[in-house]
């Protein structure tokens, strides 16, 4: 008798679970954004200080010799510095080269790409993230 009651109770529980429903709440577009940017940056501070203010960017040191990383260290043997892109042109030399090429007064916007789907356009060079700098005309 107890075995039959236990069996019926189990069947009822199974039937209740099978009749349940669920729904998925869609993500808002803001949750899908994996990059940060700044428009019309302050002209009184250096490029490394601008990068320091952006989410997901770590800057150690100061000036053109500062070390910049995005999303932490990716490899033990390879470099960890992100790719700098100025007006669509990838440059070699990291922050030092970018600081030599760009005057802070000429910067229109700085955009940091962290997600592999965004940095994939730049291939292996973008594996450590990409910092896109757009200059004023």
Image: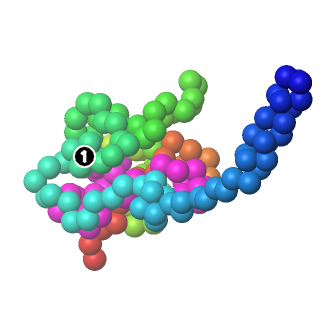
Residue 16 seen in the current view:
yes
Q: Residue furthest front?
A: 1
Quadrant of image for the N terminus:
top right
Residue 118 colored in magenta in the image: yes
Q: In the displayed structure, does residue 60 sit left or right of residue 91? A: left
Position of residue 65 measured from the top left corner of the image (x, y, whole percent): 29, 35
Depth check: give the residue in front, 43 or 93.
Answer: 43
Depth check: give the residue in front, 91 or 122.
Answer: 122
In the image, residue 109 sits, relative to residue 44, either above or below, namely below
Circle 1 Cα neighbour tier, 10 Å, few/some/many (<14 / 14–19 / ≥20):
few
Report the residue at 84% width, 36% height from top: 8
Position of residue 30 measured from the top left corner of the image (x, y, whole percent): 42, 61
Depth check: give the residue in front, 34 or 14.
Answer: 14
Numbered range of the magenta stretch: 97-121
Residue 135 colored in magenta in the image: no
Quadrant of image for the C terminus:
bottom left
The image quadrant of residue 5 is top right
Q: Residue furthest bottom?
A: 137
Position of residue 37 measured from the top left corner of the image (x, y, whole percent): 33, 58
Report the residue at 73% width, 46% height from top: 17
Q: In the displayed structure, does residue 112 sit left or right of residue 38? A: right
In the image, residue 118 sits, relative to residue 66, either above or below, namely below
Please state the total of marks drawn on the protein image: 1
Position of residue 12 measured from the top left corner of the image (x, y, whole percent): 78, 42
Kindly identify which residue carries mark 1: 53
Q: In the displayed structure, does residue 74 sit left or right of residue 81? A: right
Residue 91 seen in the current view:
no
């Amino acid at each position: 008798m107890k075995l039959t009651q236990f069996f019926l109770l189990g069947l009822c529980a199974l039937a209740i679970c099978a009749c349940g429903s669920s729904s998925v709440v869609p993500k808002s577009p803001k949750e899908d954004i994996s990059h940060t940017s700044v428009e019309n940056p302050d002209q009184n501070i250096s490029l490394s200080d601008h990068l320091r203010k952006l989410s997901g960017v770590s800057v150690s040191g100061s000036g053109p010799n500062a070390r910049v990383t995005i999303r932490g260290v990716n490899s033990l043997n390879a470099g960890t510095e992100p790719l700098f892109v100025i007006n669509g042109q990838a440059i070699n030399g990291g922050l030092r080269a970018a600081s030599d090429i760009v005057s802070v007064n000429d910067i229109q916007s700085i955009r940091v790409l962290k997600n592999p789907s965004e940095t994939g356009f730049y291939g292996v060079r973008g594996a450590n993230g990409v910092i896109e700098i757009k200059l004023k005309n």
